[in-house]
Image: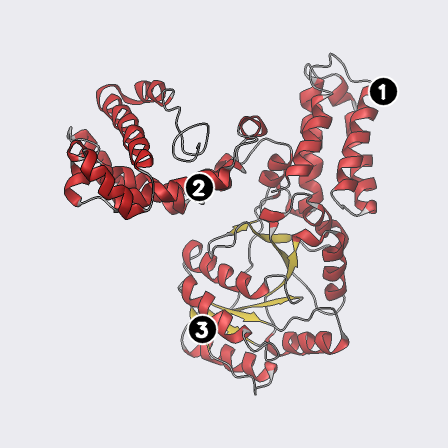
Amino acid sequence: MLESLTDRFSHALKAIKGQARLTEANTQDMLREIRLALLDADVALPVVKQFIAAVREKAMGQSVLNSLTPDQALVGVVHQELVSLMAGPEGIGQTMGLNLATTPPAVVLMAGLQGAGKTTSVGKLAKWLTERQKKKVLTVSCDVYRPAAIEQLRLVTEQAGAEFFPSQLSERPVEIARAALDWGRRHYHDVVLIDTAGRLAIDQAMMDEIAALHDAVRPIETLFTVDAMQGQDAVRTAEAFRKTIPLTGILLTKVDGDARGGAVLSVRSVTGCPVKFVGTAEKIDGLEAFDPDRFAQRILGMGDVLAIVEQAQKAIDVKSAEKMAAKLKSGAKFDLEDFKLQIGQMKSMGGLSNLLDKLPAQMQQAAKGQDLSKADKSVGRMEGIINSMTPAERRNPLLIKASRKRRIATGAGVPVQEVNRLLAQFEQMQDMMKKMQKGGLAKMMRAMGGLKNLPGLGGGLGGR
């Protein structure tokens, strides 16, 4: 995510780090690099000019020039201006979210072009509202032009654990929306999410229809779904919609595939609408409430450790974790069933490549050149190998001798060598757990230094 922009910013700021004092010359060099980075990221030119002017003014101010660490003060200025750019003055210090302060059900109208990921985003938003906000959510499709749209929304709504209001291709969009809203009122739903029709390009019929829908349901939130990978084209599309209906926010999709970041940085300034959500993965839970401060940290290579913590909180089964902690405390051995549980939790957090994106730039640099997709596949193969074992073998790995290894390898569809690698890695993990039982965290950290064979990272199953 935003790899190119992060690399360019890191390079620009690295040149100024370590400087005893800031001068017009070295500050100008840094600003030139940042300007080129923004233009290369497809950020709108007026936005680039505004950003560079704001950074220049503050960079040459007395608070920076007289700082004991002017290079750090300058990084702080760039960070502050990035946050201001993405949040607007009123949004600084706030995590963007939905305004649902109305008599239920709160209506959220979703608009956007075809192919931007709007219907999938409705499902993701339904899951986010259901899990994070504990809301009772109803979704409905008013797209009567794309035959598969209604069925697609039904499927993603089912995955999200929300309720779906059925509609027919023969019905008028306004009638569908009104019927869904009436159903939501009578069945005590907190939120009704309305998916609207998209087009391959903006046309007057589309604009008239979305305007009529808006007038009919009076949504408290009108979100425009934008494909982040379209750069300035995405921003121009959002601006065209804003002139037709009063947008309250932007939902950026496919941010995980956007190496440049132009839409993220431009859309708030050009449209005046805050970015409220970003799609960070294809899975149904791949949606994050947009936090400008944390996003600016990612752009500057500082990482987003809070996002990793949040992912862990969602992914980790608390009861299973407590059960394992009690087991280790009692002195029982860490076995292959426990190892499989750890693998499953890593997968549910999105895998190594997803976690790496949120780490600071220095740690990302250390893993550069590694095939993380291969590492993630290796984790899946490890799970497959353990699944091919009997319950007795998982509880007591010492039973696994040559003939059993051959049977397990055949069942998992891997060479016997991979079974051996997994068992060796399991032994390392088991040793680490023993050290935890005897001496706590300090010994655990030392033990982790011995785990050289992470799958796919210079050894283990993926390093073949």
For label 3, the crowd category at 10 Å Cα-Cα, with few meaning under 14, some 14 to 19 and many 20 or more, is: many
Indicate left or right for 435 with 283 as reference: left
The residue beneath circle 1 is 25
Label 1 to label 2: alpha-carbon separation:
46 Å
Amino acid type at mark 2: Asp
Residue nearer the viewer, 335 or 15: 335
The residue beneath circle 2 is 376
Residue found at x 39% / y 31%: 460
Residue found at x 77% / y 18%: 65
Residue 443 appears in which quarter of the rendering?
Answer: top left
Label 3 to label 1: alpha-carbon separation:
61 Å
Name the disc covering residue 164, or none: 3
Residue nearer the viewer, 286 or 346: 346
**Element on which disc 3 rests:** strand
User: Given the current orientation, which residue lies at the most extreme top position?
Assistant: 20
309 vs 365: above or below: below
**Element on which disc 2 rests:** helix
Image quarter in which the C terminus is found: top left
Closer to viewer: mark 1 or mark 2: 2
Q: Position of residue 103 (x, y in %)?
A: 50, 69
Residue nearer the viewer, 272 or 375: 375
Sequence-first tag of 3 and 2: 3
Name the disc covering residue 297, or none: none
Amino acid type at mark 3: Phe
Q: Position of residue 43 (x, y in %)?
A: 76, 45
Amino acid type at mark 1: Ala
Residue found at x 43% / y 35%: 462
Indicate left or right for 123 with 266 as reference: left
